[in-house]
Amino acid sequence: KGQAYFAKTAEDARRIVGKIVGSKKSVVKAKSLTGEEIDLRRHLEELGNDVWETDLGELILQLRDEAPMHILSPSIHVPKEDVARLFSKLMSRDVPPDIELEVVAAREFLRQRYVQADIGISGANIVSAETGSMFIIENEGNARLSTGFPPIHIAVVGIEKLVPTLGESFKVAEVTWRFAQYTV
């Protein structure tokens, strides 16, 4: 069962999500441009929650306390040596400056966050107004884990993602995943 809310402003959206989440919760967050635009993670942290970005690039930026550099590759500007230092400090172990090993370390670290999370937050590529069905297209697996493991899932999406019918939603989804390869 789901519940839809309409927020007119970023402040309204933060207030609604904050009320649902409460405080002292463990939250995993998959990439959501709307969540980024409204500074949702910081708001939830200010309420006393433990919030983790699960997209690898977003996690790196969270640890650096920086905004995304690029919409598709948010931490492309961060050298692997800096990532190794960040991860070594976070995980209290040596993580060498090797991208494959950094990915393995991040995966291991985040695995526990997924399992322990009280709430998962994500965006959605398309939402059917007719059924409430959400289409979440991903390539890392973090959105699936963020929405599937925690007992509560909150999707934060802009009104532009709303499509009238389920049939039209499938058409929009097909266009999205067919042409996603051309956005890199």
Image: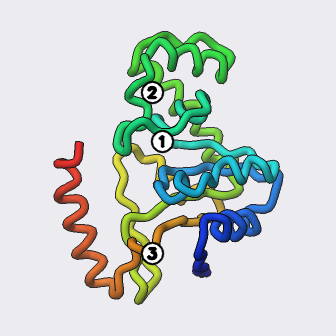
Dividing the picture into quarters, in which one does residue 75 lie? Answer: top left
Circles 1, 2 touching at the beta carbon (< 8 Å): no
Image quadrant in which the C terminus is located:
top left
Q: In the shown orientation, is residue 60 left or right of residue 19? A: left
Q: Which of labels 3 and 2 is toward the front?
A: 3
Residue 102 in view, yes or no = yes
Contact check, label 1 and label 3, Cβ < 8 Å: no
What's the residue at 61%, 46% (across, down)? 114
In the rendered structure, which disc, 3 or 2, sits on the residue that comes first in sequence? 2
Mark 2 neighbour class, 10 Å CA radius: few under 14, some 14 to 19, many 20 or more: some
Can residue 2 be seen here? The reply is no
| Residue type at tag 3 | Ile
Q: Nearer the viewer, mark 1 or mark 3?
A: 3
Assign a secondary structure to mark 1. loop
Residue position for label 2? 103
Tell me the distance, in whole angstroms, between the alpha carbons under discs 1 and 2: 11 Å
Q: Residues within 10 Å of mark 3 (few under 14, many from 20)?
A: few
Residue 50 % position (x, y)? 73, 44
Graded by Cα atoms within 10 Å as few (under 14), some (14 to 19) or many (20 or more), the crowding at tag 1 reads many
Q: Position of residue 123 (x, y in %)?
A: 48, 61
Q: Residue at x 68, y 47 (%)?
A: 42
Task: Note whether 59 is above or below 81 in the view shown.
Answer: below
Instruction: Look at the picture and state if 52 lies above or below 76.
Output: below
Would you say 62 lies left or right of 71 here?
right
Residue of label 1: 55
Q: Residue at x 42, y 85 (%)?
A: 129
Question: Viewer-proximal residue, 143 or 68?
Answer: 68
Q: Tag 3 or tag 1, which sits nearer the N-term? A: 1
Which residue is under mark 3? 159
Task: Determine the residue positioned at 82% across, 56% down.
Answer: 23
Query: Picture coordinates of residue 93 (x, y %)?
Result: 64, 13
